Amino acid sequence: MACALLCAGGSGFSGECWLEAPRLEQNGKTVWHVPFTKFAQKASQVDYWVGCNLATRSWPRWRLEFDGREVFEGNIFDRASNVSDFYILLPGDLQGTGCFKLSLLKEPHRAAFPYEVRTLEVIEETARDFEIISVPKYVSKSASFGVLIETNRPNVKLQVKSDAALQPATQEVRFKEAGLHVVEFRADFLSDRCEDGIQRR
């Protein structure tokens, strides 16, 4: 892996944003972890996440219900620190207003330690077919550059148009899988905007 792209976004919020050391998971298990700060250079001997994984048998089991309907039940990774957080994906057909109920479940032959819920938030995510994630602020004349696109469903087909200053590498693109993709352009002249050059089809 040459690099990892971390995208953090939202709307209508303010305050501080904290990024923790990334970890890679395969088949639900963490296989790689590198802290941002070397352990020997940590500023505090107490308030520091060492990145230790708890054994999967120690992961707490949670159940989330919406107006009596179970939308999730399963074990969730709990990092080795005094303040932990996790997220649960909500099903796409969840609509309307209602009451969420989060329960910590007791399992046979496994200790269920108590938790204090400090905050509970709903993270909004776009449901449109695609979104323009990133456009370079400056580009070099007569050089190629990429526009980062995120598709939210498979087989998204885009018609790419631009003004005279920007030349798309292709007039039409199709992304078979949902996720992050790059649409390539070439800047023949100077231009202010290229967001408007991509249209839904």
Image (cartoon, rainbow, N blue to C red):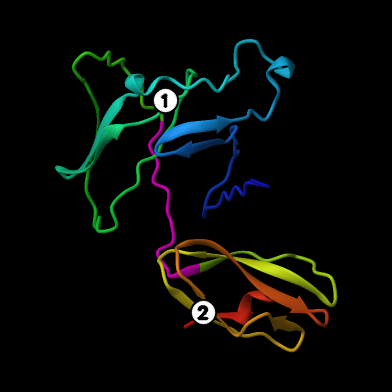
Query: Circle 2: is it few (<14), some (14-19), or many (20+) Cα within 10 Å?
Result: some
| Image vertical order of residue 119 relative to residue 55, above or below | below
Query: Circle 1: is it few (<14), some (14-19), or many (20+) Cα within 10 Å?
Result: some
| Image vertical order of residue 109 relative to residue 138, above or below | above
Nearest to N terminus: mark 2 or mark 1: 1
The label number, if any, that marks residue 78 in the structure image: 1
* Nearer the observer, 71 or 14: 71
Q: Does the magenta segment cover residue 121?
A: yes
Estimate the x, y position of residue 140 in percent, counting from the top left. Answer: 84, 70
Q: Disc 1 marks which amino acid?
A: Asp
Q: Disc 2 marks which amino acid?
A: Leu
The label number, if any, that marks residue 158 in the structure image: 2
Which residue is farthest left? 68
* Residue for point 65% across, 10% down: 45
| Image vertical order of residue 186 relative to residue 147, above or below | below
Magenta-drawn stretch, dominant element (helix, strand or loop): loop
Estimate the x, y position of residue 72 in percent, counting from the top left. Answer: 25, 41
Please give left or right for residue 29 compared with residue 197 in the image.
left
Estimate the x, y position of residue 67 in percent, counting from the top left. Answer: 17, 45
| Screen quadrant of the N terminus | top right
Estimate the x, y position of residue 71 in percent, counting from the top left. Answer: 23, 45
* Residue for point 67% across, 14% down: 44
| Image vertical order of residue 178 relative to residue 64, above or below | below
Q: Please provide the residue range marked out in magenta.
A: 119-130
Q: Mark 2 and mark 1: span between their CA atoms?
A: 40 Å
